[in-house]
Amino acid sequence: MAAQLRGSSEGSTLILTISNPEFRNALGPEMFAAGVEALNAAESSAEVRSVIITGEGGLFSAGGNLQRLQDNRQKSPEHQAQSIEVFHNWIEAIRAFPKPVIAAVEGLAAGAGFSLALACDMIVAARDSVFMMAYSNMALSPDGGGTWNLTRTLPRQLATEVLMCAEPISAERLYTLGVVNRLSEPGQAMSLALALADNLNDRAPNTLTSIKELISDADGSNLNQQLARERDHFVKNLHHPNAGMGIGAFLNKHKPTFE
C-alpha cells in the first residue's frame, strides 16, 4: 500500500491521517506536500475550524523512511536538502495556519514524527505512547524544528538529553513536563483530541487566530513589542461581530454561536 496522508472530516474538524503501515507510518515527501496542500485548502474553508494530525493503526509515526534515506546517500546532498525543505514547508504551514492544530498520538512518535507532533499547537497522547528523538541512534541530527521546539519547552539540560541520548520518553513524563496537553487511555487519543477540537470549534475563530499569532510572535518580542501587538489584536477583536455575540451571551447567560 502506497504511503499517503488521508483526509477526512468530523464535524468542523479536518483529520489528516498518516498512512504508511508497511513502514510504521514513516513520513515522506508525498505526505509533506499533501499536508501543505490540505492546510492551504482548510485555511480558506469556513467549514473547517480545527485540524487533527494522527497516524493509522495505533501508531503515530516512526519518523523518516530509513531505506529512502539510505538510497539518498547515493544521490547529491541537494536532493536530500530539497526533501527536508518540503518537510519544513509543512512544519511552517502548521505554525502559520490560523486555526488550531492538534496531534493525536498513539503508539510511537519518533524522529520526524516527534518533530511533527511538536509543531502542532497541542498534543493529546495515549498514556502508553512513547516519544523519541531517535536521530542520533543513526548518526543523524534532528529536522522538522525538533531542536527549536524542545529548547523552548524543556530546560536546556533535559532538551539536550532527549536530543542526544535518543532514549524513549513516555507520554506521562512529557505530560508532567508540560509538552503533552492531555493524556488518554490507550486507544482513545483520537476521541479525546476530537473532544478538545470540539471545545475549540465552539470559540470565535478570529480570537483563536489572534492567540496563535501572539504566541508565535512572543518568542521574538520584547515586552513593549508584545504589549503593542496584544493591544492591536484586542481592539480588532473587540470590534469584530463575534465580540458582540460573546459579551452579550455572557451577560445574558446563554451560549453564543460564533461566525
Image: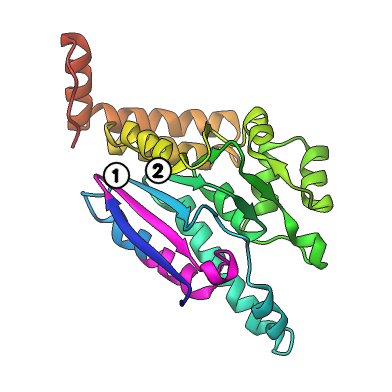
- Which mark identifies residue 49? 1
Which amino acid type is shown beneath numbered disc 2?
Pro
Residue 113 figure quarter: bottom right
Give the residue displayed 70% in from the left and 51% down from the top: 132
- Which mark identifies residue 207? none
- Check disc 1: other Cα within 10 Å, few if <14, some if 14-19, many if 20+: many
Of the numbered discs 1 and 2, the one sitting upstream in the chain is: 1
Residue 125 covered by magenta stretch? no
Residue 34 shown left or right of residue 138 in the figure: left
What span is in magenta? 10-37
Give the residue displayed 53% in from the left and 58% down from the top: 91
Q: Residue 220 in the image: x percent, y percent?
A: 60, 42
Which amino acid type is shown beneath numbered disc 1?
Arg
Give the residue displayed 54% in from the left and 64% down from the top: 25
**SS at badge 2:** loop
Q: Is residue 229 above or below residue 141?
A: above
Q: Is residue 5 above or below residue 151?
A: below
Q: Depth check: give the residue in front, 158 or 226.
A: 158
Q: Is residue 4 above or below residue 9?
A: below
Looking at the rendered structure, the number of numbered marks drawn on it comes to 2
- Which mark identifies residue 100? 2
Which quarter of the rendering shows the C terminus? top left
